[in-house]
Image (spheres, helix red, strand yellow):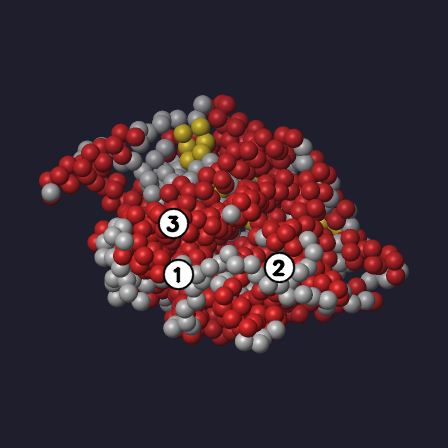
Amino acid sequence: MLRKSFISLFIALFFIAAFSAKANDIVNVYSYRQPFLVEPLFDKFTKQSGIKVNVVFAKKGMAERLAREGKYSPADILLTTDISRLIELRDKNLIQPVNSAVLSSAIPKQYQAQDNTWFALTTRVRNIYSAKRLGKIDLNYEDLADEKYKGRVCTRSGKHPYNVALVASMISEHGEAYTLDWLKKVKSNLARKPQGSDRGQVQAIHQKLCDISLGNSYYFGKMLKDEKQKVWADEVYINFPNQKNRGAHINISGVAMAKYAPNAKNAQALMEFLVSKPAQALYAKTNMEYPVREDVAVSELVASWGSYNADALALEEIAKNRTTALKLLDQAQFDL
Amino acid sequence: MIALYNNKIWKLVSYVTALVLIVPMLVMLLGGVSASTQLFLHLWQTVLPTYLENTLLLAFWVVLLALLFGVLSASIITQTNIVCKHQLRWLLLLPLAMPAYLVAYLYTDLFDYAGPVQRNLRTWFDWQSANEYWFFDIRTLPGAALMLALVLFPYIYMLTRGTFEQQDQNLIRASRLLGLTAKQSFFKVALPLARPAIAVSASLVLMETLADFATVQYFAVNTLTTAIYDTWLGYGDLGAANALASILMLLILFVVLAEQRSRTGLRHQSARPNLKRELIQLSFGQQILASLFCWSLVVFGFLLPIILLIIMAVQYSDITQLSALVSTGINSLKVSVFAATIAVFIALLLGLYQRLHADKYRHLPLQISGFGYAVPGTVLAMAMLSTLGPVDHWLNEAVEFLGFAAPGLMLSGSLFAVVFALVVRFSAIANGTIISGIKQIPQSLDYAPASLGVNLLGSLTKVHLPILKPTIMMAWLLVFVEAMKELPAVLLLRPFNFETLSSQVYQLISDEMLEQGALGAILIVLFGLLPIVLLNKHKEKV
């Protein structure tokens, strides 16, 4: 009986092994970035290199999945939409350094990890959108707490990674006590409970529910290109905050290699492709983001918004303040 | 109750199956024990009380509204003489095919300040701003409750209607002979007899509400599910998230057990379901009211949303989108069919085990196998990875030990994980439906085959399964439709290059671009309709 079951176990395992012969020319991606954006990039990469790209798109929980999968994880490459998630991956020891001259020379120093664990691919500004009916105004993030905007501010959930990063940068600049007070005042200025997406806030301005909202830069371009949403975007100016002082808050989308990447060579090839000029140009064109390479131009539309000063705060600093930012958001009961 | 059989293999399989289904929850509970009390304290001092209050209020309103919609419409359809009742009988099932988050989005679009309704009102009455008139705000807790109730009430309707239709008319006639009017006999006999079905379906609605994430998030109503997400994904504390999820699960368990206890000792069985039912004769005015009530449920729960979707699809879609949708549609179909079939098989296995076996604890496997329903999809997905991950690792190590290349994550990294998660999550639906069907089988039909010397297998294939056929189909349909709509578990567990309709549509909704996904949304609804139509056909034949 015992011998029999051992034999059948052996046979079963043999079949498992036989059926899982590895294909050579693939690279596996876990992506927080959306299909419409990365699929054209991957198609181009496959055409150039002959390496097939497999993708899982996720909205949340990537780090958890990787951690659970451990050393047998099929993931090679991780694409994220903000700095905090990259740092989270590193802090949980889920990614590995990539020593590539191509990557480190193409990307400006402040947009790559010192230990080569993560690399930015694009940058985005956390803009303030304002209703055209207010005329041109010059705003700082701090002004969102100004009493004259009572009942006139709209935003998505404070706990969204983009807002958390902004709050974290406020903590770096002003300290916890000021930031908590700022959050409470912004909350009391809100026209409605935080809800929806960044685009939804511009829609609310169009609806005259509020006059000012927070939103990432590329959404403006995307709305202008959408039949229905163009009407909303036409009602607002896109403002770059804090231009007379520290500069606008910047976040990044980035890439890292999984710690146990089974196709590390292909993964590095894909990473290097993503910072290549054609790929960066595609980022600029399809998603209206700022390419991380300084020698690749932004899209014409984005260029028309003008140049801006960026906050020089180190990205790692923002990630460090993330948990504190979340706690302050809870304390201010920002989303309630 | 005298149980008849003692089949050892069945017993073993039942217990093992139940155990397999409960393991992810146990992993979650164990994870909760290691929670950091510090974060808990912080949450308790800041946001948790509000989350808790919202959760309880939402659950209360959804269940109340769904009961009102479901029981009332089921009563009207089966007990009265309103017109069009053969059409309404199945039309009232249609809202089941609508995902709640979809309805939420469509109605927000319609009734929001910028929506066509308010825009037209402003033009007609020459109002300039929101301050000049009052209009209900749909993005609120009552709004969310209404949306959820509108698409969840068919559970209650379906099971209650089924019970009414199969009720023993002898009891009703006896009550009439004893001097009750048709109306009195409905309230004093028929309705109380339907209590198990109403209770089971109401608890399904309750669990579905507590596990909902997409709708409440869209309406910016923060509930316990929000807290679970925040602690896990925001604070990165899986332990505390597990603890919160465990609390939620225990809460539901308590409600379900209390309900079960309150009706122990009650047993309702029908011997002759096909005697003709006597209908309550409504006056003309009452008929109009009753019809209006049923039709508005159909219109608001299904017709209006689907028309809005079709309009969007016509305006925004082109034919190229359609071809891309075929593969995602097939993916959705694949996981849903697997999940529904497995869940129903398990429900039959455990339900009939409980009914037919001589085991003091025979109800146990069935009871514990349904726990997963109350767990929010994302948390369940996490628990799934925590459970399947180690098994995968063991398998890989074993294969490597034998000198072969490691095969990779065969369980946690494949469709297996998705289907397993769906089965764990929706077993409660299959169980609830199957058990309420089993309870309708008269005990005498268990004894009759046995007394004639027919063995267990014969009794099953010749008596129980044929009687249960409509119930089995109903259970399959319910799980299939739910699996079709399920989101978070699929989002988190899916293997490479695997997109389902719901994941695609949800992605677009969260970017305020449902227009682009209208075709996909219509497909979800259509797939959901298919079994409803099939079921209806089948029922008519019977």
Q: CA distance from mark 3 to mark 2?
A: 27 Å
Q: CA distance from mark 1 to mark 2?
A: 25 Å
> Are the residues under marks 3 and 1 on the same chain?
yes
Q: Which residue lies at the image location 34% right of the left edge and 35% below the top edge? A: A262
Say if B279 sits above or below B346 in the image.
below
Is residue B266 found left or right of A190 in the rendered image? left
Residue bearing mark 1: B442
For mark 3, name the chain: B
Q: Secondary structure at mark 2?
A: helix
If you read the primary sequence from the N terminus, does the residue marked by circle 3 or circle 2 appear first?
2
Q: Position of residue B279 (x, y in %)?
A: 62, 63
Q: Position of residue B145 (x, y in %)?
A: 60, 64
Say if A49 sits above or below A113 in the image.
above
How many numbered circles does the render carry?
A: 3
Q: Few, some or many C-alpha atoms within 10 Å of disc 2 (few <14, some 14-19, many ≥20)?
A: many
Residue bearing mark 2: B77
Contact, CB < 8 Å: mark 3 with mark 2? no
**Quick check: can you spot residue A45?**
yes
**Eye-nearest disc, 1 or 2:** 1
**Quick check: can you spot residue B146?**
no
Task: Name the amino acid type tagged 3.
Answer: Leu
Task: Name the amino acid type tagged 2.
Answer: Ile
Q: Few, some or many C-alpha atoms within 10 Å of disc 3 (few <14, some 14-19, many ≥20)?
A: some
Task: Name the amino acid type tagged 1.
Answer: Pro
Residue bearing mark 3: B465
If you read the primary sequence from the N terminus, does the residue marked by circle 3 or circle 1 appear first?
1
